[in-house]
Image (cartoon, rainbow, N blue to C red):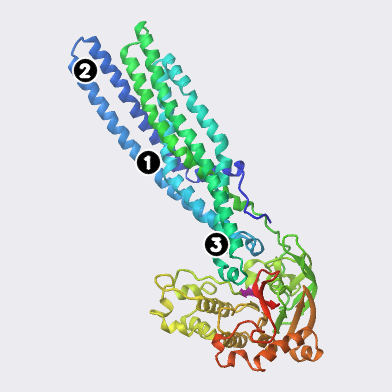
Amino acid sequence: MSAMVPVAGGARVRAAAWADLRAERGAVAGLLLLNVLASAAGLAGPWLLGRIVDAVRAGSGDVLGTVDRLALGVLVFTVAQVLLGRWALAVGYRFGERTAARVRERFLARALALPPSVAEHVPAGDLVARGSTDASVVATTLRRAVPEVVVAVVQAGLLIAAVLVLNPLLGLCGLVCLVGVGAALRWYLRRARPAYLTEAATGARLADVVTSTAKGARTIEALALEDRRAQAADAAVADARAARLRTLWLRTVLFPSFDVSCALPVVGVLLVGGAMHANGLVSVGVVVTATVYMRQLVGPLDTLTLWVEQVQGAIASYARLEGLAEVPREEPGPAGSPEDDRIEVSGVRYAYDGGRDVLRGVDLVVRPGERLAVVGASGAGKSTLARLLAGLDRPRTGSVTVGGTPVADLPPDRLREQVVLVTQDHHVFHDTVRDNLRVVRPHASDEELRGALEAVGARWIDDLPRGLDTEIGAGISLDGARAQQLSLARVVLAGPHTLILDEATALLDPRTARETERSLAALLRGRTVIAIAHRLQTAHDADRVAVLEAGELVELGTHDQLVSAGGHYARLWASWHGGHDGRDPGRQPGAAGASPHPAAGTGTRWRSVRDTDGNATAGPG
């Protein structure tokens, strides 16, 4: 998987834009019709003005009556142009709002449809930038730029056509003088798309750096990586600044070129028209009319100048939004139905992004209803194994099956019924506590919701102002521990056949974590629970313990068997047991302030490290 989400090519962007236009073809047709009528009404004024000039110069007949009637016509057509133009803009804005909503909904649907194994590898900052910044740029353009650009293009086309009909020679003169506008625009457009794509990409990388740094602040401090992250942020800011300056330079060349080029048609028509009038080829009225038409052309060209930069940025953003459809997706195999809840790991090898194998030849069978603890030193591959068991990743070789069916091949809804992975990462929606819980069971009763919260020790629900109806985010927020309990309560409501806990209680104090794990075990009795055990008391209570060492399964058995064997697990247990005097860490005096790491407080020197699973944890120094 590439580091960034793909960007759609021109063909896909054009196809998507055409589909959006077809979906609103009624509004588009109305927009064009109203703009044509408004522009046609605008053409009448200069033509009538020319008639007024010629009538005054002729000086015959009822000049005042003729001028009054022609002036009244100018007023009527001007009012009609204003009303039709306003109507056209209203239709255009409604079209823009509906189309912007459609683009946002399509992006959201595609993001939610990403397979878990793909979504886990998509940079969060890039995805957030596309769903927020890029979507906003496209929405703004559809809402404002498209109607105004359509109006400007129609007006410009009709004005040029009117001059050609009025006098072909003057019309050709005006067109020749517009060559400067075309040259400036061509120069800009050839450079704009890559420049704006680069600007959007560097902005996304900057967002990703900021997001990942803020999310991993505690880990960065623990590993003393502040300087490295600061350097990464400085580099991302420098890239974003350079890309922004590039697009700014393009605009500083385009706008002055447009200003000069837009004045040339008026000057050219006046000079050529004056020479033609001096030779008796045209009347003064025709020259005045053509000049006014050319002067009116400046308005649409100014509009195009102002919006061309926004449109180019919007095209780049549209390409980034549509690029989500080109994210490589793993094709699932035939979706069978698991025969039972038996999980088998056979000959599994796995490596991240083509690196060295994190897991090497792991074979493991998890029996239905079993409580299995997975332990090992930092970097042993515990979290990687959890991801494979949950179907988030596929092994490089070997297989991971549930009931004989590959876990990663199960449809998302069936997979979530079968296996749920709970990590220390959690999400709380800006909504009521009730709706946060009902994400997994929309029709759960209040009694079931309160029971789930009670099961994970979330007694704070009664302290909230409105209980389950309290809206989180409206002046009330949950700290990390409470948010984690809310996530665990969702698991209780979901009731999966297999629950995988990977640091799922890491943010809770040892006593609360111990009580929560016991409550979950009681509620899920008869179901399979696999715990990545960072507190060895969890392993002590499990039916079996699997010991990973450097990506290999080196020991498997009950707690008593492994302690008696005197191997890796026995050494871990002796180190932890000595530091806790054989007592449950959740029951020690002062447990609320105890260290969450198993060997903390022992004679062993421990240091904070980052394992190959990407977790900040403790390891022997």
- Residue sitting nearer the eye, 493 or 474: 474
Q: Does label 3 or label 1 sit earlier along the sequence?
A: 1
Residue 302 position (above or below residue 366) = above
Q: Does the magenta portion include 47? A: no
Q: Secondary structure at mark 3?
A: helix
Q: Is residue 515 visible?
A: yes
Q: Does label 2 or label 3 sit earlier along the sequence?
A: 2
Where does label 2 land, which residue?
66
Q: Magenta span covers which residues?
A: 417-422
Alpha-carbon distance for marks 3 and 1? Answer: 39 Å
Q: Is residue 542 visible?
A: no
Magenta span dominant secondary structure: strand
Q: Given this view, does label 2 or label 3 mark the residue nearer the observer?
A: 3
Q: Amino acid at mark 2?
A: Thr
Mark 1: few/some/many CA within 10 Å (<14, 14-19, 20+): many
The label shown at residue 89 is 1
- Expressed as whole percent of the image width and height from the top left, the position of residue 136 reads 47, 51
Where does label 3 land, which residue?
211
Q: Given this view, does label 3 or label 1 mark the residue nearer the observer?
A: 3
| Res 124 → quadrant | bottom right
